[in-house]
Image (tube, rainbow, N blue to C red):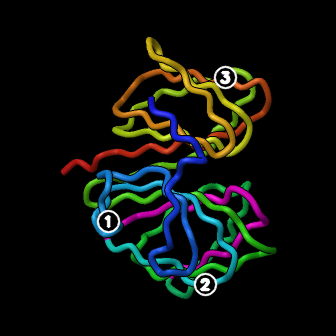
């Protein structure tokens, strides 16, 4: 289990030049945006506009803070996303644009190359002790709020604070989560696509 601290995320321009993103992790390491298999990133969206296109990728958007945005795909399908909304998955190569509801938002973006990987993103509230079984090829634990202690049997534990992330390679079994106060994690499971 590797801890990635929020202060160490790599700052990068958006692919379409419309803003800036903080890359949390990507695979393979050092690959260009057109060659990645999967990527986790965080961005501040400060104005309305189109999303960058990522051919062959599926992506999931989760609002972390702010009042939210309206996401429109292909000119007709649309959803309102707020911090309490479920993460929204959509094709990265479908034209998408967003309108802010009341000012800037911070979002978390998960992308996987659909012919090699697929992913699932879900919120996990932690207040006291919780247990999660890790079955994915890669698991990321992203701390949305609070402080959470994450421990795998026989390994060192890591403490995640607001916007920190932990990566776990391979199906690792039982993960113990502990928080002294109400906290929220995003559990991001990345699976290899089987032929």
Q: Is residue 97 magenta?
A: no
Q: Residue at x 48, y 21 (%)?
A: 174
Residue underneath mark 1: 32
Ranked by sequence position, the earlier of labels 2 and 1 is: 1
Numbered range of the magenta stretch: 56-73
Residue at label 2? 49
Q: Look at the picture and state if 151 lies above or below 183.
A: above
- Residue 75 falls left or right of residue 29: right
Task: Select label 3 or label 1 by which is in front.
Answer: 1
Instruction: Determine whether, in the image, residue 72 is placed left or right of residue 59.
Output: right
Splitting the image into 4 quarters, where does residue 33 fall? bottom left
Dot 1: few (<14), some (14–19), or many (≥20) neighbours within 10 Å? few
* Quadrant position of residue 130: top right
Quadrant for the N terminus in the image? top left
For disc 3, the marked residue is 178
Give the answer, above or below, for where 66 lies relative to 146.
Answer: below
The numbered mark, 3 or 1, whose residue comes first in the sequence reads 1
Residue at screen point 70% across, 32% down: 147
Secondary structure mostly taken by the magenta-highlighted segment of the chain: strand
């Amino acid at each position: 289990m590797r801890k990635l601290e929020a202060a160490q995320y790599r700052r990068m321009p958006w692919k379409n030049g419309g803003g800036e993103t903080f890359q949390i992790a990507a695979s393979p390491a050092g690959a260009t945006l057109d060659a990645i298999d999967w990527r986790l990133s965080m961005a501040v969206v400060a104005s309305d506009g189109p999303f960058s296109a990522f051919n062959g990728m599926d992506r999931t958007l989760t609002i972390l803070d702010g009042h939210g945005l309206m996401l429109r795909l292909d000119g007709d399908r649309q959803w309102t996303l707020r911090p309490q909304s479920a993460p929204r998955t959509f094709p990265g190569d479908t034209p998408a644009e967003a309108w802010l509801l009341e000012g800037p938002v911070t979002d978390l973006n998960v992308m996987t190359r659909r012919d090699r990987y697929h992913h699932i993103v879900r919120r996990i509230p932690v207040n006291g002790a919780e247990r999660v079984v890790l079955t994915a090829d890669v698991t990321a634990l992203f701390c949305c709020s609070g402080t959470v202690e994450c421990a795998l049997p026989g390994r060192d534990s890591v403490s995640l604070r607001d916007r920190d992330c932990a990566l776990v390679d391979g199906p690792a079994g039982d993960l113990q989560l502990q928080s002294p106060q109400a906290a929220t994690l995003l559990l991001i499971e990345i699976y290899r696509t089987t032929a």
